[in-house]
């Protein structure tokens, strides 16, 4: 489980974000903090893997404590000015999400962070391709459906992702086509794109004919 510390000056918002984290597969909220000083103290005490950090805190700015937090950081803030974004990223924040944002946007970024973290697990040498892959994993959720090849529809990709999220287990392209109303060929193209980007998992099941059947699974598990 990835432990998350939520830092926000608004008690209601902090509680909301904390409860949301607990609904994301593979994540759990380990605590909340409402000031910059408390963020540092709680990070030292709780040792979270990830901090969701607000910028405007009663006793200082979130960007002023990023380097003091012994954890990965994603900024969740109303500050959208270029100077704050530069400061956050240059001090070590891995990602930046501007309020107001949707639950789906935060969900996608947390799961992208989990894929990034999993890819870099262990102590091993990485070649450039693997490093590039890790960076891509971290940011492929920055748009609702990540980067799509030219000619693909973000709306269709999102419908297919939603179908995978709701499925109780692995599904085929035919299953996805039936649920979304697209053709089997279209479903196969989008599923292949999403599997290549790491957004979904692809498994092979071999039947009596020896030809493998492609099964697709949402990486985060079933929602709800």
Image (cartoon, rainbow, N blue to C red):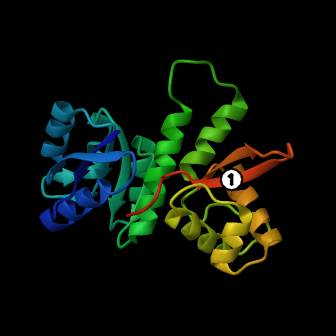
Residue 40 visible somewhere in the drawing:
yes
**Residue 9, picture quadrant:** bottom left
Q: x, y percentage for residue 203?
A: 68, 45
Q: Considering depth in this image, is 175 or 207 the residue closer to the camera?
A: 207
Residue at horizontal 81%, vertical 45%? 208
Q: x, y percentage for residue 107?
A: 42, 60
Residue 144 visible somewhere in the drawing:
no
Task: Decide: is 153 above or below 126.
Answer: below
Quadrant where the C terminus is found in the figure: bottom left
Residue at horizontal 74%, vertical 52%? 214
Q: x, y percentage for residue 132?
A: 67, 39
Residue at horizontal 27%, vertical 57%? 54
Q: x, y percentage for residue 116?
A: 53, 41
Q: Is residue 145 left or right of residue 43?
A: right
**Residue 12, picture quadrant:** bottom left
Task: Decide: is 192 above or below 38.
Answer: below
Q: Is residue 184 left or right of residue 144?
A: right
């Amino acid at each position: 489980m990835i432990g998350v510390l939520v830092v926000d000056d608004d008690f209601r918002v902090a509680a909301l974000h904390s409860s949301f984290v607990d609904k994301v597969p593979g994540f759990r909220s380990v605590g909340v903090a409402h000031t910059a000083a408390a963020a540092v103290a709680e990070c030292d005490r709780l040792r979270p893997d990830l901090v969701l950090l607000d910028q405007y805190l009663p006793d200082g700015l979130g960007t002023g404590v990023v380097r003091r937090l012994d954890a990965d950081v994603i900024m969740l803030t109303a500050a959208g000015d270029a100077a704050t974004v530069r400061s956050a990223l240059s001090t070590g924040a891995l990602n930046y999400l501007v309020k107001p944002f949707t639950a789906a946007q935060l969900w996608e970024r947390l799961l992208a962070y989990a894929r990034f973290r999993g890819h870099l697990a262990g102590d091993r040498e990485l070649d450039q391709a693997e490093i590039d892959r890790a960076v891509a994993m971290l940011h492929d959720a920055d748009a609702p459906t990540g980067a799509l090849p030219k000619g693909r529809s973000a709306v269709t990709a999102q419908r297919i992702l939603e179908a995978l999220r709701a499925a109780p287990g692995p599904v085929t392209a035919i299953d996805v086509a039936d649920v979304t109303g697209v053709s089997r060929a279209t479903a196969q193209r989008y599923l292949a794109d999403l599997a290549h980007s790491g957004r979904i998992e692809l498994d092979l099941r071999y039947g009596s004919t020896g030809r493998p059947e492609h099964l697709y699974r949402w990486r985060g598990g079933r929602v709800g």
